[in-house]
Image (cartoon, rainbow, N blue to C red):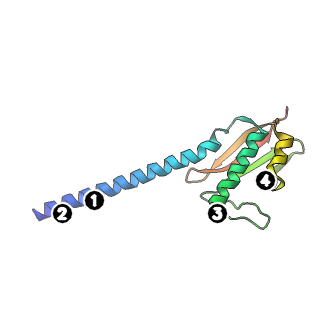
């Protein structure tokens, strides 16, 4: 009788542990989806400069909250879990700029010049854990 009770107790404990791990995994995946939603909706979409500036601010804020390290030039250093990097390719001068250059110069200035210019999110990369890692916005040529 004791052996049956011990066996059943072990089965209940194992089922509880598996259930807990599964629920934790699902909660983590839901959190990742929720965080990515702010950025994913711009994937393969045409957006204006105001939206790009807003995403830059969100990415800087997210990197700061996640304590992503910076290099000696003030640019965030990509990590394997939580960093977000946004680059903007300007057809005006055929140059790609990191988000920090717009942020440090003031996103207000970027908005002033590029608010009504169209950009397209042409590339999105993800970390191994599924979180947004990198986005590239390209200035539309007809803008």
Circle nearer the N terminus (4, 1): 1
Q: In the picture shown, does residue 12 fall above or below 39? A: below
Q: Residue at x 52, y 49 (%)?
A: 31
Few, some or many residues within 10 Å of mark 3 (<14, 14–19, 20+): few
Kindly identify which numbered label has been placed on residue 103. 4
The answer for how far apart the CA atoms under marks 3 and 2 are is 46 Å
Few, some or many residues within 10 Å of mark 1 (<14, 14–19, 20+): few
Q: Quadrant of residue 113?
A: top right
The answer for how far apart the CA atoms under marks 4 and 1 are is 51 Å
Of tags 1 and 3, which is closer to the observer?
Answer: 3
Q: Residue at x 59, y 58 (%)?
A: 81
Q: Residue 119, position in %: x, y?
A: 78, 38
- Residue that lies at the very extreme toward the left in this rendered image: 1
Circle nearer the N terminus (4, 2): 2
- Disc 3, disc 2: CB below 8 Å? no
Circle nearer the N terminus (1, 2): 2
Q: To which residue does mark 1 refer?
A: 13
Image position of 73 (left or right of 3)? right
Of tags 3 and 2, which is closer to the observer?
Answer: 3
The answer for how far apart the CA atoms under marks 1 and 3 are is 37 Å
Q: How many marks?
A: 4
Label 1 element class: helix
- Quarter of the image that includes the C terminus: top right
Q: To which residue does mark 3 refer?
A: 67
Q: In the picture shown, does residue 90 fall above or below 73? A: above
Of tags 4 and 1, which is closer to the observer?
Answer: 4
Image position of 22 (left or right of 117)? left
């Amino acid at each position: 009788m004791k052996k049956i009770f011990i066996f059943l107790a072990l089965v209940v404990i194992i089922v509880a542990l598996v259930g807990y791990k599964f629920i934790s995994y699902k909660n983590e995946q839901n959190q990742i989806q929720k965080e990515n939603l702010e950025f994913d909706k711009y994937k393969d979409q045409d957006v204006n400069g105001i939206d790009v500036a807003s995403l830059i601010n969100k990415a800087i804020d997210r990197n700061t909250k996640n304590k992503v390290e910076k290099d000696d030039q003030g640019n965030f250093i990509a990590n394997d879990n939580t960093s977000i990097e946004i680059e903007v390719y300007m057809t005006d001068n055929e140059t790609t700029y990191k988000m920090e250059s717009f942020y440090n110069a003031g996103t207000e200035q970027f908005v002033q010049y590029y608010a009504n210019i169209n950009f397209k999110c042409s590339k999105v990369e993800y970390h191994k854990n599924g979180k947004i890692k990198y986005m590239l916005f390209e200035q539309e040529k007809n803008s």
